[in-house]
Every structure is written in structure tokens, then in C-alpha cells.
Amino acid sequence: MKVENPRTDILSRKRFSREDLVRFVVFGGVLTKDDDHKLPGRGVYLKKGSGSLALERQCFNRILHRPLTLNEEEEIRKV
């Protein structure tokens, strides 16, 4: 029996199951949405529907220690 660990949302700092969150990972130097939760690297999790607020509060910049490109911001806004 596999036990699933909850993940922490970078905006609210609350723990949710993986089904409630969207995973983003820096892959090849670009922030990429990881729909299958299988890309290598450190992932950051964001609750579905809170992309604009996370950008406003600069959560990704704080966690990833780098600024986002315009394409990356557009990808996050779609969530």
C-alpha cells in the first residue's frame, strides 16, 4: 500500500494532496508546468486557480531565487 505525502502550496503554505495542486519545475533553465509530476528537479506546488495571486505576491521569485520571464508568467496565469 502506497502512502501519499501531502504537498505544501507556496502561496498559502498549507498542505494539500497532489490532485489539488499544480507542480512547476525548472527544467532546462525554464519554469515548466509538470502535469504528470514526473519531471526531474525540485518542484514547487501551487493550488489550482491561484496563479495570478502568486505572481502578485512574487512567490515564485522568492522560492526559485530568480526572476520569471514573461512566458513563464503567462503559463502561471493560466492555472
Image (tube, rainbow, N blue to C red):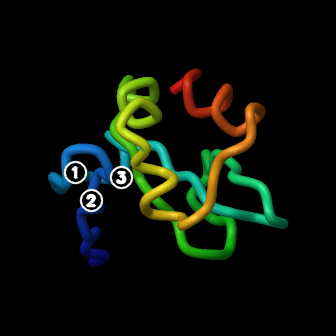
Q: Nearer the viewer, mark 2 or mark 3?
A: 2
The disc, 1 or 2, on the residue closer to the chain's N-terminal end is 2
Residue 61 percent location from the top left of the image: 51, 54
Q: Nearer the viewer, mark 1 or mark 2?
A: 2
The reply to whether the C-beta atoms of the residues labelled 1 and 3 are less than 8 Å apart is: yes
The disc, 2 or 3, on the residue closer to the chain's N-terminal end is 2
Q: Which residue is mark 2?
A: 8
Numbered tag placed on residue 39 in the rendering: none
Q: Choose between 68 and 77: the one closer to the eye.
A: 68
Numbered tag placed on residue 18 in the rendering: 3
Quadrant where the image shows the N terminus: bottom left
Residue occupying the point 64% across, 45% down: 33
Residue 12 percent location from the top left of the image: 20, 45
The reply to whether the C-beta atoms of the residues labelled 1 and 2 are less than 8 Å apart is: yes
Q: Secondary structure at mark 3?
A: helix
Give the crowd class for mark 1: few <14, some 14-19, many >=20 residues within 10 Å.
Answer: some
Numbered tag placed on residue 16 in the rendering: 1
| Amino acid type for the residue under numbered disc 1 | Phe
| Amino acid type for the residue under numbered disc 3 | Arg
Q: Secondary structure at mark 2?
A: strand
User: Can you name the residue that lies furthest to the right here?
Assistant: 28
Residue occupying the point 32% across, 40% down: 20
Residue 73 shown left or right of residue 4 in the figure: right
Residue occupying the point 29% across, 61% down: 7
Seen in the picture, residue 61 relative to 11 is either above or below; the reply is below
